[in-house]
Image (cartoon, rainbow, N blue to C red):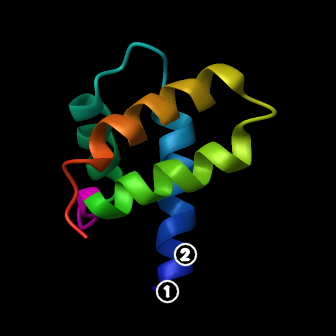
Amino acid sequence: MSKTKVNDGLERSLVELVRPGLKPKELIDAVRKRHPKASKKQIVRAAFSSLIKIADDEEDKARALQGFAIAERSSVND
């Protein structure tokens, strides 16, 4: 599977699963149920990417994704 398809799948899952008040670990666990091979780094990057795509249309989800991505970015090694 190509990197783009993996990212698209992660982005879709993040948008479907995220909700205000969801803890970062809960979101990571939920995404990994759908994408067991996804690294935390891939999930965080997909969160930033999906945030940009949904910012205008789904404000609550975008805020929740932003909080998740910012909180988790510091624990991801490049």
Describe residue 4's horizontal placement relative to residue 31 as left or right: right
Q: Residue at x 63, y 19 (%)?
A: 60
Quadrant location of the N terminus?
Answer: bottom left
Q: Quadrant of residue 45?
A: bottom left
Label 1: state its secondary structure.
loop
Taking 1 as reference, is 7 above or below it?
above
Q: Are marks 1 and 2 in contact (CB under 8 Å)?
A: yes
Q: Amino acid at mark 2?
A: Lys
Taking 54 as reference, is 43 above or below it?
below
Dot label at residue 59: none
Give the x, y percent position of residue 4.
Answer: 56, 78
Q: Residues within 10 Å of mark 1 (few under 14, many from 20)?
A: few
Q: Residue at x 80, y 34 (%)?
A: 56
Q: Amino acid at mark 1?
A: Ser
Q: Main secondary structure of the magenta part?
A: loop
Alpha-carbon distance for marks 1 and 2? 5 Å
**Closest to the observer, 37 or 62:** 62
Q: Residue tagged by mark 1?
A: 2
Give the x, y percent position of residue 77.
Answer: 19, 64
Q: Residue furthest right?
A: 56
Q: Residues within 10 Å of mark 2 (few under 14, many from 20)?
A: few
Describe residue 42's horizontal placement relative to residue 39 as left or right: right
Give yes or no for residue 12 being in the magenta stretch. no
Q: How many marks?
A: 2
Quadrant location of the C terminus?
Answer: bottom left
Q: Quadrant of residue 42?
A: bottom left
Taking 21 as reference, is 63 above or below it?
below
Give the x, y percent position of residue 11.
Answer: 54, 54
Dot label at residue 5: 2
Q: Residue furthest top?
A: 21
Q: Residue at x 72, y 36 (%)?
A: 55
Magenta segment range? Answer: 36-40
